[in-house]
Amino acid sequence: MPQHTLPRPICGHCDGFPQVAITTGQTKPDGERKTITADCPACRGTGHTLPARAYARTGA
Ligand SMILES: [Zn+2]
């Protein structure tokens, strides 16, 4: 993967891919696969980590 300098750090939890489509194994009547989308819980679907100052200090 090419490394680019980004204005904000990429979320280490999802590696910058905050939304994943999960197939449910079911198909819609038109034959399309039914998927659900899950957002990364760490960055809430933004793909970037928040600035440290945006976090309340938890000691973690
Ligand atoms: Zn993330």
Image: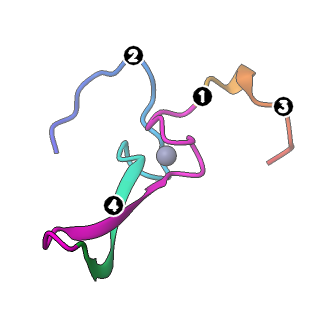
Seen at 39% across and 16% down, the residue is: 7
State if disc 2 and disc 3 touch (CB < 8 Å).
no
| Disc 4/disc 1 C-alpha distance (Å) | 23 Å
- The local secondary structure at tag 2 comes to loop
Q: Which mark is residue 56?
A: 3
Which of marks 2 and 4 precedes in the sequence?
2
Which of marks 1 and 3 precedes in the sequence?
1
What amino acid type should be assigned to the residue bearing mark 2?
Answer: Pro
Magenta stretch, residue numbers: 29-49
User: Which residue is outermost to the top?
Assistant: 7
What amino acid type should be assigned to the residue bearing mark 3?
Answer: Ala
| Disc 4/disc 2 C-alpha distance (Å) | 26 Å
State if disc 1 and disc 3 touch (CB < 8 Å).
no
Q: Is residue 5 above or below residue 16?
A: above
Seen at 54% across and 34% down, the residue is: 49
Eye-nearest disc, 4 or 2:
4
The residue identified by callout 4 is 21
Q: Quadrant of residue 36?
A: bottom left
Which of marks 4 and 3 precedes in the sequence?
4
Query: Which quadrant, please, contains the N terminus?
Result: top left
Which of marks 2 and 3 precedes in the sequence?
2
- The location of residue 5, given as percent across then percent down, is 29, 21
| Disc 3/disc 2 C-alpha distance (Å) | 22 Å
- The local secondary structure at tag 3 comes to loop
Q: Is residue 37 left or right of residue 60?
A: left
The residue identified by callout 2 is 7
Q: Is mark 4 within 8 Å of ligand 1?
A: no
